[in-house]
Each structure stands twice: as C-alpha cells, then as structure tokens.
Image (spheres, rainbow, N blue to C red):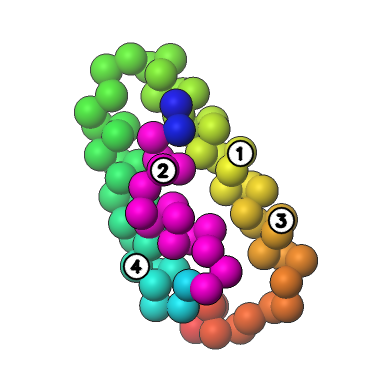
C-alpha cells in the first residue's frame, strides 16, 4: 500500500533540504510513477488503497509546507 511513498522522488519531496529544481524533478517523476501504477495495477481495490494512502501523506506534507515561509521561487 505504501509503494508510491517509498520512492526516491517522494523522499525528495518530503525532505526539507531539497532544492527547487530537485522538487520539480521529483514531482515529474512521481507523476510518472502514478501513471505507471494506474496502467499496470490489476486490482482496483489495491490501486485505490495505494492512491488514497499517497493522497493522505501528500496532504500532510502540504499542511507542513503551508506552515513554512512562503517561497515564491517554487511558483516561477
């Protein structure tokens, strides 16, 4: 169930030490992994659980990032 959250790209997104370019690259890689998983997973229930868990963890990361200072560089 934790398959996507255990990838290198997810760890990069979770790290406070990641640079803007690393975050952008990791985001692209994670999107590719999501697409690959969606195309390859046969069991819909398993896919739903993996995606739901990943969404939950991403929402937690989003809340943590909102608590940090706003960084306009990420949005250029």
Q: N-terminal of the two: label 1 or label 3? A: 1
Please tell me which residue is depicted at 41% across the width and 43% down the height of the picture: 6
Q: Quadrant of residue 38?
A: top left
Q: Is residue 1 left or right of residue 43?
A: right
- Mark 3 lies on residue: 63
Please tell me which residue is depicted at 44% across the width and 53% down the height of the picture: 10
Q: N-terminal of the two: label 2 or label 1? A: 2
Q: Which residues are magenta?
A: 3-17
Q: N-terminal of the two: label 2 or label 4? A: 2
Q: Is residue 48 left or right of residue 73?
A: left
**SS at mark 3?**
helix
Q: Main secondary structure of the magenta part?
A: helix
Please tell me which residue is depicted at 39% across the width and 72% down the height of the picture: 22
**SS at mark 4?**
helix
75 in relation to 11, above or below: below
Q: Is residue 46 left or right of residue 40?
A: right
């Amino acid at each position: 169930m934790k398959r996507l959250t255990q990838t290198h790209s997810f760890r990069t997104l979770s790290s406070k030490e990641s640079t803007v370019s690393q975050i952008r690259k990791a985001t692209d890689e994670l999107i590719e992994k999501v697409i690959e998983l969606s195309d390859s997973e046969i069991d819909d229930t398993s896919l739903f659980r993996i995606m739901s868990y990943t969404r939950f963890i991403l929402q937690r990361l989003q809340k943590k990032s909102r608590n940090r200072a706003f960084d306009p560089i990420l949005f250029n």
